[in-house]
């Protein structure tokens, strides 16, 4: 296992290498700890409320939503909050 992966920076390394794969023109940034925790809670809620396989696919869709929302001027935090609200409404949990 590489040192970067051993220190838990898989997501930072992944963001950097995905940017490099696009010729260095990508704008992916590592996910900060607060957003990571919120996204993991959403994935957990999806996995526990539906088939487990829906969790990573929901995370992918949420990531695309957040990216598009940010391009439209919404903050990352607000976009994640909005996505979480949508997920809660679908799985039948009350709004936070």
Image: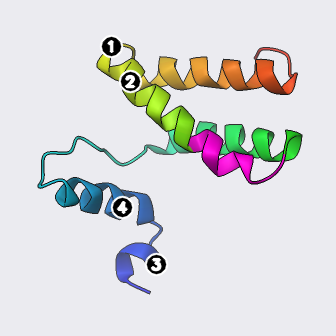
Q: Image quarter for residue 88?
A: top right
Is residue 21 visible in the rendered structure shown here?
yes
Is residue 34 visible in the rendered structure shown here?
no
Number of the label disc, if any, that sits on residue 6: 3
For marks 3 and 4 on the same chain, the one whose residue lies earlier in the sequence: 3
Do tag 1 and tag 2 residues touch (Cβ < 8 Å)? yes
Quadrant location of the N terminus in the rendered image: bottom left
25 vs 80, left or right, is left
Q: Is residue 22 magenta?
A: no
Q: Which residue is mark 1?
A: 72
- Residue 74 position, x and y percent, is 39, 14
Magenta stretch in the rendered image:
51-59
- Name the residue: 44% across, 72% down: 7
For marks 2 and 4 on the same chain, the one whose residue lies earlier in the sequence: 4
Our reading of the magenta stretch's main secondary structure is helix
Q: CA distance from mark 2 to mark 4?
A: 20 Å
């Amino acid at each position: 296992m590489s040192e970067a992966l051993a220190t838990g920076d898989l997501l930072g390394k992944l963001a950097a290498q995905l940017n490099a794969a696009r010729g260095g023109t990508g704008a992916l940034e590592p996910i900060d700890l607060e957003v990571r925790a919120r996204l993991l809670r959403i994935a957990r809620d999806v996995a526990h409320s539906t088939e487990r396989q829906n969790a990573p696919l929901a995370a992918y869709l949420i990531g695309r939503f957040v990216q598009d929302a940010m391009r439209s001027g919404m903050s990352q935090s607000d976009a994640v909050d909005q996505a979480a609200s949508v997920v809660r409404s679908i799985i039948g949990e009350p709004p936070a």
